[in-house]
Amino acid sequence: MPRPAPSSEPRACQFENERLYRAYLVIQKFRKTVICDPKGVTATWAGTDLCGSYKGFFCGRPINVSDRTVASVDLNGFNLRSDSLQGFVDGLPDLALFHANSNSFGGAVPNLRGLQYFYELDLSNNKLAPAPFPTDVLGLTNATFIDIRFNSFFGELPAGLFGSFPEVEAIFVNNNRFSGQLPDNLGDSPVNYLSLANNDFTGPIPSSIGRAAGTLLEVLFLNNSLGGCLPYELGLLARATVIDAGTNRLTGTIPLSYACLRSVEQLNLADNLLYGVVHDSLCRLAYDGRLANLTLSGNYFTWLGPCCWDLVREGKLNVDRNCILWAPNQRSFHECAQFFHDNWSRMTCPVSKYVPCHPKWYAVDAASAREEPAAAEEYKYRTYSALHP
């Protein structure tokens, strides 16, 4: 009886340890599901040297484990296509990071609850199956980075997104099809970088946002259908460098609390239904704080403080398409009159004259702020970068 042909597959004894052998089997199984590989990446996924020659795979030693194992997978920009990640990501038990931006991975998000070391997930810009927010992700209590932008997720965000991750630094869910109201506990998250842009969220910005004053550095509400009064609590975000609530249906006046945004560099409230006076105290942030760009175009403001006119001339303040006398590029008299006629009875947003930062304390703090590097200088405007795939 003829002997069977010897297998070309490496044997377990040829690997550095059992963990790497088991990872090898998972990778080979996934490799067979890849149906498009324009950069020839999977050709490197052969042999026993997972830690050296496998492109996109990186090894490390888990806590209290002496053996090396696959700890990180970075497939960003490889343009791989596979109909599913099931059995791959969740099949690598020692995985800590999985980055797969700009591929064509389909199917559902794998259940990663069993990955005890896992803390970074990037599935952005893929072809994942349209589905509600993947609630299994909420089990990743060590997570510091959650990025599912540029997919087709829909429905409401679960409250757990803002209460399940005590160490989270970044949450990017922009450019999906999420809808409904934002969870009331949004401000309970310690997140530093939050992008909710380019969805279809409705309802108000939760007042709990003020509780994030000590941690939130950048937040994008841009291009949704958010309504209600522009919240006073946004002015409590003393560390924030970016606040963008442009292209929504927010209304009311700008609360005086916004004069306390001593770290803000980019403040965008354009294309809403805001009205009233743009106070000097806000515009002074360009001189007493870090404000570099204030965008208020496409609203119904009627008056600018003297300092604000200086910002217009300097190109730091855009008030196009408002109702401001003597300012260029304004709405017609008829359009402004129609707005105030139609909305007069609905102009019920509270007008608070309370400024929650003491002027003397504020001046000292602003001066020290100018001496220190801006928050998140190393990752300048990470949320705006997240608006690109």
Image (cartoon, rainbow, N blue to C red):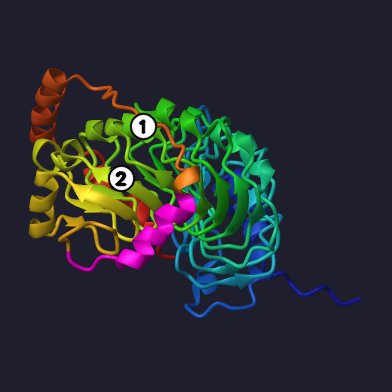
Please provide percent x and percent y for residue 97.
50, 47
Residue 190 within the segment the image draws in magenta: no
Q: Which residues are drawn in magenta? A: 328-343
Q: Inspect the image, locate mark 2, and give the three-letter code of the amino acid beneath it.
A: Gly
User: Which element carries disc 2, helix, strand or loop?
Assistant: strand
Taking the image as shown, residue 273 lies to the left or right of residue 109, namely left
Taking the image as shown, residue 280 lies to the left or right of residue 40, namely left
Point out which mark residue 143 bears.
none
Taking the image as shown, residue 339 lies to the left or right of residue 359, namely right
Please provide percent x and percent y for residue 239.
28, 33
Residue 337 within the segment the image draws in magenta: yes
Mark 2 and mark 1: span between their CA atoms? 10 Å
Q: In the rendered structure, are the residues bearing label 2 and label 1 in contact, judged by CB atoms less than 8 Å apart?
A: yes
Please provide percent x and percent y for residue 301.
29, 51
Residue that label 1 marks: 351
Residue drawn at the location 83% of the way across and 73% of the way down:
3
Point out which mark residue 276 bears.
2
Q: Inspect the image, locate mark 1, and give the three-letter code of the amino acid beneath it.
A: Val
